[in-house]
Amino acid sequence: MAKKKAAAKKSAAKKKTRKAGAKKAPERKAPPAGRPSALVDTRVVYCGDCLEKLADLPDRCVDLIYIDPPFNSNRNYEVFWGETKEKRAFEDRHASTQAYIDYMRPRCVELKRVLKDTGSFYYHCDWHASHYVKVMLDQAFGENSFQNEIVWRRSGAHSDTKQGMKRFGVVSDSIFFYTGGSQQWTFNPEYQPYDETYVESMYRHVEEGTGRRYRLDNLTASKPGGDTSYDWPTPDGRSVRPYKGRYWAYSRKKMEAFERDGRIVYSRSGMPNFKRYLDEMPGVSLQNVWVDMPALASRSKERLGYPTQKPIALLERIIKASSNPNDIVLDAFCGCGTALVAAQNLGRQWIGIDVSPTACRVMGKRLRDVCKMKESEPNWLAHSTDAFIVRDLPWTIEKLHKIPPFEFENWAVIALGGVPNTVQVGDMGIDGRIFPVGSRPDDQHSMFAGDWFPVQVKQKDKAGRPDIDQFEAVMEREDRQRGFFVAFGYTSDAEHEAAAFHKRTGRWIKLIAVQEILDEQFVQKM
């Protein structure tokens, strides 16, 4: 016995020594106000390949993922403003369906890793590769995690019989809906109004005095349970029971409450029926075919010119259904940022990723203009709920030298607060337009309406006098009093010519160096 006590005492001493010498586990700090997680930053737009950016995110940190990646089709999805050279590069890279699936597979595996077990994942694609995408997603997420194929009717009827294409018109996209693996994923059902013919046939009674439509429901059930066998008194002094094999669906106490509330209507036989009002019904549960939100019209105020831009109502429906306020929403191919705007407007946290610097700048501008957010590192670090940041843009001279010319042009125009051209061919010497405050037309695609200033961009170390001469001709042709020219630098002849042009014509050409844009000194010149 003494030996056992000594051994126990010695063992306890060893445990105490190990405990004293062990490192204290770091305490997880409570998330700051406006930040749902201490492990992941939100309200951030990352510029870069999502395969690399996702690797920096921890496991199971996102509640909802929506992606609308470049599809394997002839439509120009990756290019922001429809530049021909970039379209050829896209077609070369995704020359086959297999190449496209090989490109997307590792990215979907990473997306599965960062999705919470209780989270939801939506993959938006068109018919060109949708069946291959479904097989790939089954492998990445598991067949049992598949919930729906949502069919979105993006356009009205049209003919696909041009140039010998004898087939039915294609008017829809597919959205594949998967969940993270748990059986407890978030889902908030949405309801739509009843069809008019259904209302007329089912809710054909109209209440006098109130005008409320209602229908009559049976108050009996096929199975007994609780206080469901009793005689019910009718207004004419009789009493009734359910038909043979039926029982009252409610207790006597509940039926009496219905009677007091005027919710019972009696048939000629004396059987009570429940008065069910139309305005108390939620509507028809939303199904997997969505026909009530077409793609954006060419003159829609919401439209930015981005080739794959989706209506914000579509993203709001998905976000409402599969997330709750303050949940984290991720779009890893976020383009012009529709999912981010919808998430911000609905009180969700969000993370955006896109490989295009132009798209990231458009996202930033849209978040500022539409959501009234501030692109501010200090405010974001202070956890302000209306602040966001854009990470990893090519903010150095060296990186800006390397990006494609059309990306450079769009970056410069957007940085000046302007609107880039929607085409790169036949731009007539104008790469973008700046609309003074209060003069921008209601239709943002009517570029020649109202007052505007032309912008010319050259990806040159030194723009020379010939460049300025050409821009002078543009300003005189368009009868513009002020214009902006962007380059990395200028020759002395270019600077002298711009000054002489003003002296000669009264028109101003503001020469802006790229470094001034990076240092935000261009605001003084504007």
Image: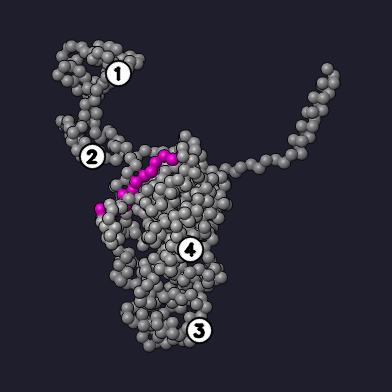
Q: Amino acid at mark 4?
A: Pro
x, y (%) of residue 293? 30, 49
Q: Are marks 1 and 2 in contact (CB under 8 Å)?
A: no
Q: How far apart are the alpha carbons under marks 3 and 2?
A: 69 Å
Whichever of callouts 3 and 1 sits on the residue coming sooner in the sequence is 1
> Which type of secondary structure does the marked residue at label 3 adopt?
loop
Q: Nearer the viewer, residue 487 or 20?
A: 487
- Mark 4 and mark 1: span between their CA atoms? 64 Å
- Amino acid at the residue labelled 3: Thr
Residue 299: x and y in percent read: 29, 61
* Quadrant of the image occupied by residue 452: bottom left
State whether residue 469 is above or below residue 279: below
**Crowdedness near tag 4: few (<14), some (14–19) or many (≥20) residues, C-alpha within 10 Å:** many
Q: 423 left or right of 179?
A: left
Residue 58 appears in the figure: yes
Mark 2 residue type: Asp
Q: Which of the two discs, 4 and 1, sits closer to the camera?
A: 1
Vertical position of residue 271 compared to residue 311: above or below = above
Label 2: element kind = loop
Q: Which residue is mark 4?
A: 357
From the image, state whether disc 4 or disc 3 is nearer to you.
4
Q: Residue at x 32, y 54 (%)?
A: 295
Please tell me which residue lies in front, 403 or 520.
403
Q: CA distance from mark 4 to mark 2?
A: 46 Å
For the residues labelled 3 and 1, the Cα–Cα distance comes to 92 Å
| Quarter the C terminus occupies | bottom left
Q: Which residue is labeled 1 in the image?
A: 222
Disc 3 residue crowd, few under 14, some 14–19, many 20+, Cα 10 Å? few
Question: Which stretch did the figure color magenta?
Answer: 145-158
Q: Where is residue 21 shown, x and y percent of the image?
A: 76, 39
Marks 1 and 2 sit apart, C-alpha to C-alpha, by 30 Å
